[in-house]
Image (cartoon, rainbow, N blue to C red):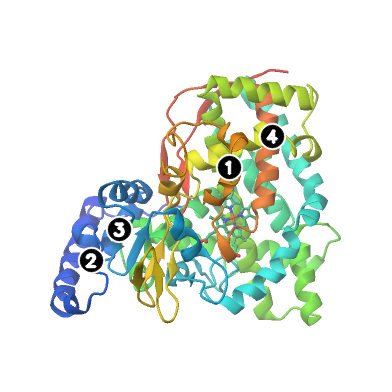
Amino acid sequence: MSTIDLPPVFDVFSIGVIIMTISSMLAALWQKYGLRKDPLRDIPGPFLARWTPLWLAWQVRMGRRYLVVHELHKKYGPFVRIAPNHISVAHKDAIPVVYGQGSGAFDKSAYYHAFVSDKASIFSTVDRQDHAHKRRLVSQAFSYKALLSVAPLLHTSLNNFVDKLDEISTREGWIDALSWFNFLAFDILSDLAFGEPIGMVLKESDTVAVMGADGKITQENAIALVDEREHLAAVVGIHPWFKTLSKFLPDPFFIHGHKSSTGLIDLARRRVTKRLDHGSSRDDILNKLIDARMEETGQLTEDQITELIAETVTLLIAGSDTTSNSITAIIHLVMTHPPVYKKLMTELISAIGPDGVPRHENVKDMPYLQAVIDEGLRYYATTAIGLHRAVPRGGAMCLGKFFPEGTEMSVPAYTIQHDATIWRDPENFRPERWLEEKDLGRYLMTFGKGPRQCLGRNLAYIEMQLVITTVLLRYNIELKSSTLETTEGFMHKPLHMMVKLSRRI
Ligand code: HEM
């Protein structure tokens, strides 16, 4: 990652002071001019959150939003005001209201403008028609049938991964498994979405060549680019002004974040341009995305190429560390729950046997593995925050309360996934619950809900099933720590997972 040296005066403390100063000024203004008209005044929440969006932005910046919001719901109940115009609703009946389909559906709020670089993508567009159009183009590449045709590419990446891990695990003592799952997930996604693997596993590094708009090539760390870009967007999305204002803040967090957004676009531009110039008969997602546009217009316009680049960046961000973070958390949970490990291994060994790297057809129908993955996603919560939506024209009722048009609302994923009225003993990691009870998936928020739910869910499950099975069958795993330290940007992510590996078979 490129570094920028700034005077020590711009440390977290100074930034905190600046933020608090601005926030109290805003609070005073708000109090003077806004109090009487405040339609959300009855909803409880922290004092500062009532007056300024900076309170929530600060929680996100510190990587602890989901926990703070979880604690607030314990204190105040189902409704909490987490920003002047944002209500968090922790109740299962709020899920179909906030994330439902149909004419009264809530659209994504202006929060998502922060995720737009050159052009809005399927993930970041807030316009319903634009989204429907983009989703039609992109979803062709993600049907289960289309994914089966890309499964061989996955198998190649996985083979490279275990070869490398075999070598590393004998060469080194403790290794950070999270980095290796990240390398693998980025290789798989770049292979599918950019038409070539970035080659992180083979290089043992996430360094990539990035071409700027001026044609200059620099070396950047791709994983850091994604992390920084995503965390920046999650902070500045809290208020429409923040994105522009943050470009002038002399804080490394914002400087790196903005630079990373550009870096990712450059990374994609280089690869998409190469594919368009040279073509390929390869059966991958990039070709499917190009074909879908060609079918529509016969040839690609400049605008469509920019859109294609935005779409590939989205896929890389949406599909890489989300999957590797989930795999890391699930393996950590399995290894810290010996009865689960034992039961899972019995299923894996009897279904797959000892040889080689399993293929998709070997792992797709294993009930206990599926239950372990779902329980891991529930308990750990890769998506832990509530995803922002805007109340549509005319306002909306939610749990008997009226919310005016334009109010931002969200249902906090972690809190729902740990809600004792939905899950029996929610603080226990117990995969069996998924085999005992039907329809629990209704309350699993990890992939989002409704019309904007995750498009890559099938691919994510295929990847998680394959990687978890391969790693558990092939290696004995010793964890350095039974605690998984995590942080949060837009997604909830482990900081590392140190392990010692030795071949089991
Ligand atoms: C375990 C892994 C994954 C998790 C937890 C996850 C989670 C999510 C969530 C929560 C959303 C909704 C976001 C929102 O409403 O703001 C989403 C959307 C999306 N995800 Fe995933 N995702 C995962 C894997 C993937 C993969 C592998 C891909 C494909 C490359 C992918 C592509 C997308 C896309 C394109 C969207 C936008 C869908 C739309 O707005 O129509 N995701 N994902």
- SS class, disc 4: helix
Query: Which of label 1 and label 2 is nearer to you?
Result: 2
Marks 2 and 3: in contact by CB < 8 Å?
no
Relative image position of residue 391 (x, y in whole percent): 42, 73
> What type is the residue that disc 3 sits on?
Val
Q: Earlier in the sequence, mark 3 or mark 4?
A: 3
Judge the density around disc 1: few (<14), some (14-19), many (≥20) Cα neighbours within 10 Å. many
Which residue position is annotated with label 3?
Answer: 80
Q: Earlier in the sequence, mark 3 or mark 1?
A: 3
Which residue position is annotated with label 4?
Answer: 367
Q: Which mark is residue 324?
A: 1
Q: Residue at x 75, y 74 (%)?
A: 293
Query: Which of label 3 and label 1 is nearer to you?
Result: 3
Q: Which mark is residue 54?
A: none
- SS class, disc 1: helix
Viewer-proximal residue, 69 or 262? 69
Query: Which of label 3 and label 2 is nearer to you?
Result: 2
